[in-house]
Image (spheres, rainbow, N blue to C red):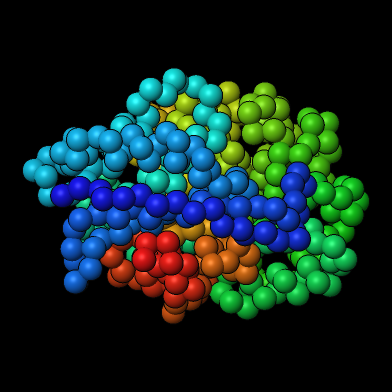
Amino acid sequence: MKILEIREKTLPIASPIRNAYIDFSKMTLSLVAVITDVVRDGGRVVGYGFNSNGRYGQGMLMRERFIPRILEADPASLLAEGGENLDPHRIWSCMFTNEKPGGHGERSVAIGTIDMAVWDAVAKIAGLPLFELLARRYGNGTPGRRVFVYAAGGYYYPGKNDDQLKREMTSYLERGYSVVKMKIGGATLAEDQRRIEAVLGILGAGQRLAVDANGRFDLDTAIAYAKVLSQYDLFWYEEAGDPLDYELQAALAAHYAKPMATGENLFSMQDARNLVRYGGMRPDRDWLQFDCALSYGLVEYLRTLDMLRANGWSPSRCIPHGGHQMSLNIAAGLGLGGNESYPDLFQPFGGFPDGVRVENGYVAMPDLHGIGFEGKSDLYKVMMELSA
């Protein structure tokens, strides 16, 4: 058993939308195919992976460092005990050879993307959905087959007014979501307050709004927003300041007693540990958004979950960023609190397999081997083009 080839392609996911910090007019991602010599159902097992939106494709790093290390390694050194499957942990260690600690930058995106493809292949070789494999290996043995999801949108868009924002959010609610998220910080506080109240005005019983500043604010602005936001029953106030400014996050907690969320731009277990040590995050109400596809993959995410437990946090307080099926499988297999979803954006990479519907804010996990990409026809068509 061995990996025969690893292919990477940089693809555009460009859009005229923007948040408080960046626009997506030139956004890309990396798509990876890990091709093995294992045959299932008459064809070679291929694992697929891609990185989440908001970080650009990392093809050069993959081609120059990480893919060659895997392909040059002794194939037997990458196998699990008994040689019946690939070992994601050994493959991860192989990729990290000759990498200094710290400086987690965007190499974490390159490794995380390949890691996703490896786990997809491992679950397919095992003949299991990834969430089932994770529950057996690292969870309580029984996956959660219903996963909470929320709809992320509400971006700034040229010419977009409050009525258009309300129509967008209404469309998510009509598709079964109970929590919707919108961007703030890309306009004045007064304008954002008007936008927030416009969305709150369309919500029904049991429906909630989350807001996301994408790290835009200094402390004074974050506090000014907190004072206004405190009057509403928001699902969370997300990433007010720079993701590495733990002092700002901790200070903000003194001014905002309701739930906050952050972590999507922390790319290692060590950075996540610094957040829970120094960021003033409260395990009884706040949410952690670490995204395995951006932070060295599931191998590192497992270390992060162990660290969180040791620091008094439950995995149920994690709702990953990214809106991809990898995190959806992790949520189901390891008992996370849910997953982000992009119903209309970043297609075909966002969303669920064909036929999966949101009902009262939850999706039911389909029984598809691996991560389940083959069940999403528009995405699988793109993946097949890479592996053909």
Q: Residue at 63% of width from left, 28% of height from top?
A: 244
- In the rendered image, which quarter is residue 92 located in? top left
Q: Position of residue 174 (x, y in %)?
A: 63, 78
Q: Position of residue 294 (x, y in %)?
A: 51, 43
Q: Is residue 279 visible?
A: yes
Residue at the far left: name it: 82
Viewed as shown, does residue 328 lie left or right of 226? left
Viewed as shown, does residue 104 lie left or right of 301? right
17 in relation to 91, above or below: below
Q: Residue at 80% of width from left, 61% of height from top?
A: 157
Viewed as shown, does residue 75 lie left or right of 52? left
Q: Is residue 321 visible?
A: no
Q: Quadrant of the C terminus?
A: bottom left
* Viewer-side residue, 41 vs 61: 61
357 in relation to 318, above or below: below
101 in relation to 196, above or below: above
